[in-house]
Each structure stands twice: as C-alpha cells, then as structure tokens.
Amino acid sequence: MGASIKSKKNKFNSGIAPDINITPFVDILLVLLIVFMVATPAIVSGLTINLPKAKQTSEIKLENKNITVTIDAKKILYINDKFVSQDDFVNTIKSQSNPNPESNVIFLRGDKNLAYSDIMGLVNLLATNDYTNIVLVTEDV
C-alpha cells in the first residue's frame, strides 16, 4: 500500500559524501603570498643607494609636507624618487613644497660613498633658500 521510505533514501544516498578539497586552494594562496613577499621590497625601493649606518636613530612623525631628496654615488639628484637636474633643483623643491620653506621637512638621502662635502653642499644650498628642517636619513646598524 505504501511506498518504502528506505528505498527512496538509498536512491539519493549513494554512500559518497561530497566535500571540497581545499589543498589546491591553500597551495595557490601560499604561492601568491610568496610572490607578494618577494615583489614588495622591489616596489618600495625605486632608487638603490647605500645609506650610511648609524647606531642612534629615531623616528620622526611630522604633519608638514615632506620632501625626499636623494643624491646617489654619481651625484645625480632625485626629488621624491624623480630625477632632477642640478640647475632645476631649487625651483623643483619650491614647486613641490609649502609656500613657507620653514614648514617643510627635507629628508636627505645620500649615498655612503659620497664625499662629506657633497652632502654639505646640498645642505648649504637648501639652507640658503630657507629650508632649514633637514633630516639626514641613515640605516640602522
């Protein structure tokens, strides 16, 4: 008279439980993580210079407009990682900074193979144009 419930249950239950194998998914995620870990330092350091090392360093948190000036071993100047000629250096600094030079902070990155006079020449050039907030960037020892 009635249908057997057991037969319907067996019809849909073949004994194999469906599940998702997440091992390939985890493998792909780990490979992507490694790729990003390797690529990130290359993206951050656009210019390669050898900074001098210092034992005592401190972090500076400033709210003013910050400008990074880099001079490499060949005495080539960069402002915020963009090449600038020595003739246009002061004009480029003025165009990228606040109208009041004293409110700007200049982060000076100089290659450790440069002569001290080259760094001081750049500091003096900035100081004669009223840029007196100059921070020398070094690496931790």
Image (cartoon, rainbow, N blue to C red):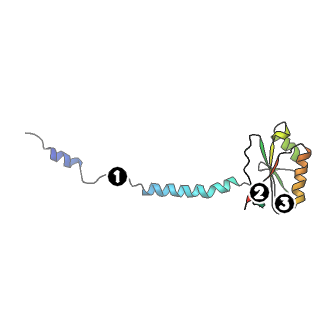
Q: Amino acid at mark 3?
A: Lys
Q: CA distance from mark 3 to mark 1?
A: 62 Å
Q: Is residue 23 visible?
A: yes
Please name the residue shown 66% across and 56% down the image: 41
Could you say which disc has been placed on residue 138 in the image?
2
Taking the view exactly as shown, the residue that stands out farthest to the left is 1
Do tag 3 and tag 1 residues touch (Cβ < 8 Å)? no
- For the residues labelled 2 and 1, the Cα–Cα distance comes to 55 Å
The amino acid sitting under disc 1 is Asp
Q: Quadrant of residue 93?
A: top right
| Residue indicated by mark 3 | 74
Element under label 1? loop
Badge 2 density bin: few <14, some 14–19, many ≥20, Cα 10 Å: some
Label 1: few (<14), some (14–19) or many (≥20) C-alpha neighbours in 10 Å: few
- The first of marks 3 and 1 along the sequence is 1
Q: Amino acid at mark 2?
A: Thr
Picture residue at 74% right of the left edge, 40% below the top: 63
> Based on the displayed image, in which of its 4 quarters is residue 117 positioned?
bottom right
The quarter of the picture where the C terminus appears is bottom right
- For mark 1, what is the residue? 19
Disc number lying in front (2 or 1): 2
Is any atom of residue 88 visible in this view? no
